[in-house]
Image: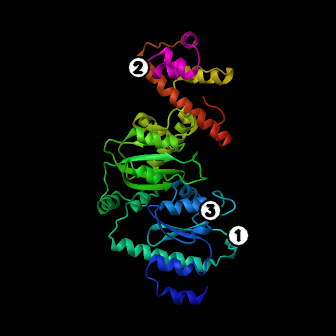
Amino acid sequence: MNLEILKEEEACYSLKELLDLYANYIKNPMVVINHNYELLYYTQTNKGDNVYKEATNAGVWSLELIAIANNAFKNKSEYVILDSINKNKRRLFYKIEHNTMLGYLVLLEEENSTFDELDYDTLKHLVNSIGKILYLEDYKKNDANIQTFYKALLNSEYKTKDILKTKIEDYKVNLDASLLIISLSKASFSQNNYLKVKLESVLAVNAVIAYDDNVLIFFNNDNMPLSKITDILIDNNLTALYVKKILDYFSFNIYYKALTNLLRFLEESKKSVLYFEADYKIYLPFFTDKYNINEIKNFIDLKIMKIYNDDMKNETDNINTLYFYLSYDKSLSIAANKLYIHRNTVSYRLMKMSDMYDMDFNDLMQNKIYLYSIFLVKYYHYKLLMNETGFLLKKA
């Protein structure tokens, strides 16, 4: 490591001074992102690609790009090198930590300054120095970083309920906060969509966290503007699950995994862009690791299971016919529109099912059981195909 830079660093008291100094030794464009994904300082924008220039102009980093880095960091490494954003200009993400997660240092590879030529000891020292500056700045602001609280929940760091209670008081957590989980699994990573900025313009946001392939938005629910949220989701090709009130903070990691598994399943159905957890609360236990695929099957009504098996064998669509018919108050017209068939065809299918499987569609309680089982058989089918292939081939 260059000893001269250590002497010069002694005169640096701000992030700007530090980055400007190291820019003389590290020729790659650099940007520092804080825990709120805001750009604190950056260098050499003239050398950046369009994604880099857009981000520096906007003053905020794309959550979609952060999601890529988060997934790459799952091996617990200090830094990752990514080429999925721009193969000609790789990014190096280095985590900035000092007692807590503070952000990222991102470097952009240049033709004349490749990552193979980097002095990684110098880079590690720079990251440590940045971490100290950011930590002191947060301390001076008395910033009880709420991001830290929610990330600790996601990582199951609070081992007892007493510790959790203390942290809730320390961070002044709003226990009535709502949660919006947005799936980024099908989002485009080729450009910055500035999802964080858009969401903060319509919601009273407490915290925004990119985690796995998702963005979690914790916000005060004062009449959530559903139409505006829906427009943002449609415009950005995204799907979300809305949780009006978080019911389990102590086992939040398990709760979160169930919610995201549910969201992935709903996302495949492509019936909507915004789903409501309240509509699916009864099914949440099946989206944890509590039940395997055979145990899920045991909860499905035998007649519904028989219809499903016959559909798979004969390539018919009676399950969806029954689902749409019962879901929309036994409306033949709506079921026909959903299935793109004539209402007489719907009527014929229902009559055949009634005869073949001895079903009475006038029994309201039994119809609820059928709907419950149809949802589970769709999930069973989804799990079956995912277990066999790793991706979904055919929908029930």
**Residue located at (57% from left, 47% from top):** 187
**Residue located at (55% from left, 72% from top):** 43
Residue type of the residue flagged with mark 1:
Glu
Viewer-proximal residue among 241 and 372: 241
Q: Is residue 202 left or right of residue 24?
A: left
Secondary structure of residue under mark 1 = loop
Which of pointers 2 and 1 lies earlier in the amino acid sequence?
A: 1
Residue 258 in sight in this render: no
Q: Position of residue 76 (x, y in %)?
A: 57, 65
Residue type of the residue flagged with mark 2:
Met
Looking at the image, residue 225 lies above or below residue 311: below
Q: Is residue 175 left or right of residue 230?
A: left
Instruction: Tell me if residue 58 is in the magenta stretch.
Output: no
Q: Give the quadrant of the C terminus.
A: top right
- The label shown at residue 111 is 1
Circles 2, 1 touching at the beta carbon (< 8 Å) = no
Secondary structure of residue under mark 3 = loop
Q: Is residue 382 left or right of residue 301?
A: right
Mark in front: 2 vs 1: 1
Q: Which residues are magenta?
A: 322-351
Mark in front: 3 vs 2: 3
Cα separation, mark 3 vs mark 2, equals 60 Å
Residue type of the residue flagged with mark 3:
Asp
Which of pointers 3 and 2 lies earlier in the amino acid sequence?
A: 3
Which of pointers 1 and 3 lies earlier in the amino acid sequence?
A: 3
Dot 2 corresponds to which residue? 365
